[in-house]
Structures are given as structure tokens and as C-alpha cells.
Amino acid sequence: MPQQPAERVPATRRPRASAVRTEGTGTARLADIAAQAGVSEATVSRVLNGKPGVADATRQSVLAALDVLGYERPVRLRRGSAGLVGLITPELENPIFPALAQVIGQALTRQGYTPVLATQTPGGSTEDELTGMLVERGVAGIIFVSGLHADTSADMSRYERLRARGVPFVLVDGFSPGVRAPFISPDDRAAMHLAVTHLASLGHTGIGLALGPVRFVPVRRKIEGFVDAMRGRFGLDAQDVTGRLVQHSLFTLEGGRVAADALLDRGCTAVVCASDMMALGAIRAARARGLDVPGEVSVVGFDDSTLIAFTDPPLTTVRKPVPAMGQAAVRALLEEIGGTPAPHSEFVFMPELVVRGSTASAPVRAAPEGMG
């Protein structure tokens, strides 16, 4: 018997995904854009085809969804950039900085600005050099993340000189009473209270704090919060806490390992770290001694960086409110650019404790001398 030909589906019956073609990026699914914007596919189609009858706020949501998903806008819907905005970060090895950069960059793009990321590197350009480069390129404003404004030993007059040149700026992570600008910060003191309260509820009394150099404002605030929490929970003397249970190092994995080693030598059964990278180093220090995490040593990080939930064990950490902080930084800068500067004040955002697998009940063993 001759083989029957396969049924041919008429063109009108062939199923196809709803899609729109955009320049340079191939085909974007309407469903993906609609889901991102929170509207119907029909609304997306009307916006992309320039049809009337769509509220301006809805139209902007659809265009922002295109930007976030990485699709180019159709030529007729593109708008000229409202200007360049510089974003200066200390480095990108710590994943919290790319996370902040992404939030800030997306918020700027939605407002029509083009973000320019400038990153300091060891032996490379300094913050002042990067600032000068951005100013020469005519940026509308600059956002500084964990810059010299957070260093109590730095000369703050550089920011007054920048203001004198008419360049609006916002400072993230760190505060200086001598700089007239909006500051955006997490509540570092509250973060330490969250960590200490969690560990104390698990029966830990030997709790140590590992953090970076004391000259940085966030470090000082974390120490203040830690001392206050340990004094309130265990009745410890402030000088005793800072002398035995606080260890300074570097904000790196190796720095966390060194600091944790010192705290473990003093009998600590739990270590609170000022960054997730330091916390991973603390876990490495415990394991090098043959100690189980969290069975014998509990570790708490700070930031809740990307992929931290997938470490071994998943890291308990204090989550830095990155989306809220990044969006607030952009809003404050745009107010400065628009001629209605924010007052010289600090906008402080509450962090959140995220409990995962690196903390557990305290082991049954002697606490450090003078504890408990």
C-alpha cells in the first residue's frame, strides 16, 4: 500500500506564539513582555504598534518591560537619553555591588537616563579620577556606592568641590555630617540586633563579630549595634565586648577566615560577619579545624548576595534592602537634577534576617570566660 502523505496543516491553523519583532534582538514574545509589565498581551501589542487608547503609565510599564528583558524598543518608540548618570562602585568582586548597580541602572533607564558604570580596581583609577572623567563627559549626576564618603579618614572637601561645579550627587552606604547631600544606608545597628537575637535564641552566648577596618562608617555602626545587643542580652561590658568579641580584618573571603580563626580561638560558637564573603571565609576557617557548620559553629552573613542561598550550607544572613536602597538613590538624584534637592539627611532602610542552614542550636560546651 502506498504510504499516505502526512497531513498538511493549513497556514490559518498552524499554532504560533504571539510575538513581535524588534530590531537587533530577534523575536520577543508578547507573553513575556506582558508578564513583566503586568498587562495583557493585547495591551502590549497596542503599545508596540503605536495604537491609541493606552494610559501613559501603562505604556511606560510596557516600555520598561522591554528594557528589563533586554529587547530593543521599536524605532518609533525610542526616546533620546535624558542624559548620562555616573555610578561609581569600589569593586565588582563582591556580588552585592553588581546587584546594586543593576537596580540603580534599571531605575535610571526607566526614567530615560543612561547609566555609566565606573569601577575602581586595585592599581587603577581612583574615585577622584573616575569622578573627573564622568564630569568631563557631562553627566547629569553621580551616585557613589561605598565610596570615600564612608571612610572617616578621607577628606570630605572633594564632595563640596563637586557640588561647587554644579554636579548633583547621592551617596550610598556611609554618612558624613560635613557633606551636604542625600545619603542612602541600611540600618547597620538594627542588622546586628537581628543577628545577635537570632543566635541567642539558639542558645549561643559566645558570639563574635568579624568585620572590616574600623575607619569605615558602616563598620562603626555595626560595632555599636553589636555591643548594644550583647550588653542588652547578656549584660556584658562594652569594653569587654569590643576587646574580645570584635575582630577586624578585610571584607574578603580570606579576611573572614582570618577573623573567624581569632574568634574561634577565644571560644566563640557563633560568628556574625559584616559581609557574605567574610561569612564564607568563616565557614572555611571552622571546617579547617574539623568543626561542623552549623553543628559546632554557627555563621551569619550580611548582604544576602546572589547565590548565597545555594552555598554549603545555605547561609543565614541579614538581607540588605538593595531594591529599596537603589530606587531611593535614583529618586533622590533625580530630585537633585530637577532642581528640588533633598535635604542634607540620611534615608535609612531596615534589613531583614534570612534564616537558612548555617545556624543551629549552640553545642554543649563551655562558653568563653566571663560569658553566660
Image (spheres, rainbow, N blue to C red):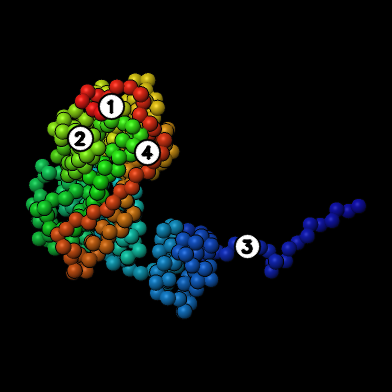
Q: Which residue is mark 2?
A: 235
Classed neighbour count for the residue bearing mark 1: other residues with Cα under 10 Å, few (<14), some (14–19), many (≥20):
many
Q: Is residue 332 above or below residue 226?
A: below
**Residue at x-position 91% and y-position 52%:** 1
Disc 1 from disc 2: Cα separation: 17 Å
Query: Residue placed at 30% from the left, 63% from the top?
Result: 113
Asked which secondary structure carries label 4, the reply is: strand
Q: Which residue is mark 4?
A: 316
Q: Is residue 352 visible?
A: yes
**What residue is pinned by disc 1?**
268
Question: What residue did someone put label 3 on?
Answer: 16
Q: Nearer the viewer, mark 3 or mark 4?
A: 4
Which amino acid type corresponds to the residue marked 2 in the rendered image? Gly
Q: Amino acid at mark 3?
A: Arg
What is the quadrant of residue 220 in the picture? top left
Residue 278 circle label: none
For the point 40% across and 64% down, the residue is 64
> Which x, y percent locates residue 39?
49, 67
Query: Does the residue at mark 1 contact the one at mark 2 (Cβ under 8 Å)?
Result: no
The x, y position of residue 92, in whole percent, is 30, 43
SS for callout 2: loop
- Give the label, 3 or 1, closer to the camera: 1
Q: Secondary structure at mark 3?
A: loop
Asked if marks 2 and 4 touch (Cβ < 8 Å), the reply is no
Q: Is residue 109 left or right of residue 185?
A: right
**Kind of residue indicated by mark 4:** Thr
Q: Which tag is nearer the camera, tag 4 or tag 1?
A: 1
Mark yes or no: residue 253 visible.
Answer: no
Image quadrant assignment for residue 138: bottom left
**Circles 3 and 4 in contact, beta carbons < 8 Å:** no
- Of label 1 and label 2, which has the lower sequence position? 2
